Image (tube, rainbow, N blue to C red):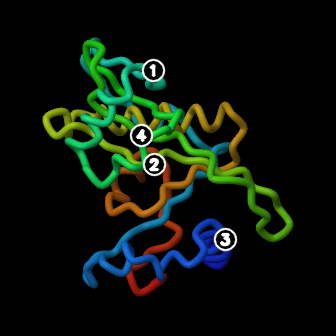
Amino acid sequence: MKKQEAIILFHSMHPNFFEQEYIQSLSEEWTFDEMFLRLDEFDMSKYEKSLDTSITFGFFEGNREELLEVVEQVDSDWIKFFIGEDRVFCAYLDGKVVSFCHIQNMGTYSINGQTLKIGGPGCVGTLPKYRDKGIGLMMVKKATQILKEEGYDYSYIHFTYVAQWYAKLGYETVLKWTKNGIL
């Protein structure tokens, strides 16, 4: 996706984004990435990691309060995004959530006469004691595959500061921004 197309799409998906109080409260020094992955080019073998055989993946079906407790341990500001959210995909260790993300339908947009169905993993988090083991990235890999199987054209990572992490799966930065706007 070309930068100008990405800018148009960003403003379509997130109108008045830079005027939001939360965005304006961010530090001047912080830079964030917007990333896309064409799902017809997504390769499940791009990232391989041997995990503990007790790790499983699937949509969350348990007690919502237990999920919210896990989310709070990762980022308490995210709890509001998980209340009532049905498409939460998780990594489990012995049946307990250790990593989680939304699988979001972000809508259908027209760019240069082409209609694009866009989805993506959002609010990706892993409990601190399970980080740096490959669990979270393997979960995002599986979530991305679900989006591909559901017929999405692009998977979109919005508002991240860990672009190198997502790049391991083939996601590419199309825009960088600060609280003051697109760079």
The N terminus is located in which quarter? bottom right
Identified by mark 4, the residue type is Cys
Residue on which disc 3 sits:
12
Name the foreground residue: 50 vs 130: 130
| Left or right of 39 on screen, residue 56 | left
N-terminal label among 1 and 2 = 1
Residue denoted by label 1: 61
Q: Is mark 2 on a helix, strand or loop?
A: strand
Type of the residue with mark 1: Glu
Indicate left or right for 113 with 14 as reference: right
Q: Earlier in the sequence, mark 3 or mark 2?
A: 3
Viewport quadrant of the C terminus: bottom left
* Label 4 – label 2 distance at C-alpha: 6 Å
Contact flag, marks 4 and 3 (Cβ < 8 Å) = no
Which disc is residue 101 wearing? 4
CA gap, disc 4 to disc 1?
13 Å
Q: In this view, does 145 lie to the left or right of 29?
A: right
Measuring from the top left, give residue 27's x and y in whole percent: 25, 79
N-terminal-most mark, 4 or 2: 4
Image point 32% across, 58% down: which residue? 162
Q: Residue at x 81, y 70 (%)?
A: 112
* Residue 182 at x, y percent in the picture: 48, 82
- Residue 122 is marked as 2
Pick whichever, 48 or 122, lies toward us: 122
Marks 4 and 2 close (CB-CB < 8 Å): yes
Q: Of 128 and 74, which appears nearest the observer?
A: 74
User: Quadrant of residue 14 in the image?
Assistant: bottom right
| Label 3 to label 2: alpha-carbon separation | 18 Å
Count how many numbered circles sit on residues in the image. Answer: 4
